[in-house]
Image (cartoon, grey):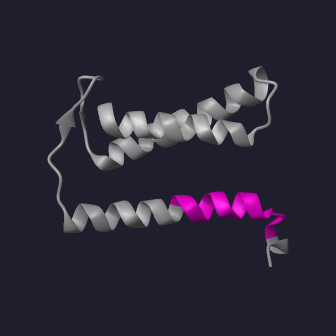
């Protein structure tokens, strides 16, 4: 099924999860409009902004994990989930 672009299931899963997140956040924005808030960064952020910050930060966490940490890559997911919780709570 994924032969047309030499994709692997983990790669396809990654993009599917991103698409599902964007869909969920779009529905949330329509159903429950949000007033931007100020967090520890002292800038106004919405749910979408915090999602973007989380995705960007998680990419850097995974890159640093690959280069600097001797443990298996799936453990970086735990760090990313803690980072995501912190961003959505305090940013």
Going by the image, does 46 lie left or right of 3?
left
Count of marks, rendered view: 0
Magenta: main secondary structure:
helix
Residue at horizontal 64 percent and vertical 57 percent from the top: 14
In the displayed structure, would residue 28 be above or below residue 38?
Answer: below
Evaluate whether residue 74 shows in this view: yes
Name which quarter of the figure residue 38 lies in.
Answer: top left
Evaluate whether residue 91 shows in this view: no
Q: Position of residue 22 (x, y in %)?
A: 43, 61
Outermost bottom residue: 1
For the N terminus, which image quadrant?
bottom right
In the displayed structure, would residue 41 be above or below residue 59?
Answer: above
Residue at horizontal 60 percent and vertical 39 percent from the top: 78
Q: Position of residue 9 (x, y in %)?
A: 77, 64
* Residue range highlighted in magenta: 5-18
Q: Position of residue 82 (x, y in %)?
A: 50, 36
Residue at horizontal 76 percent and vertical 30 percent from the top: 66
Going by the image, does 8 lie left or right of 43?
right
Outermost top residue: 68
Going by the image, does 9 lie left or right of 28?
right
Q: Position of residue 13 (x, y in %)?
A: 67, 63
Name which quarter of the figure residue 65 lies in.
Answer: top right
Determine if the magenta segment contains residue 23: no
In the displayed structure, would residue 63 be above or below residue 14?
Answer: above
Residue in the foreground of this view, choosing between 5 and 89: 89
For the C terminus, which image quadrant?
top left
């Amino acid at each position: 099924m994924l032969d047309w672009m030499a994709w692997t299931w983990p790669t396809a899963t990654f993009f599917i999860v991103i698409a599902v997140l964007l869909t969920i956040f779009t529905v949330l924005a329509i159903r429950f409009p949000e007033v931007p808030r100020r967090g520890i960064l002292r800038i106004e952020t919405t749910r979408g902004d915090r999602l973007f910050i989380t995705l960007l930060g998680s990419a850097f966490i995974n890159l640093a994990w690959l280069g600097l940490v001797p443990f298996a890559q799936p453990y970086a997911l735990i760090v990313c989930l803690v980072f995501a919780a912190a961003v959505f709570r305090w940013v």
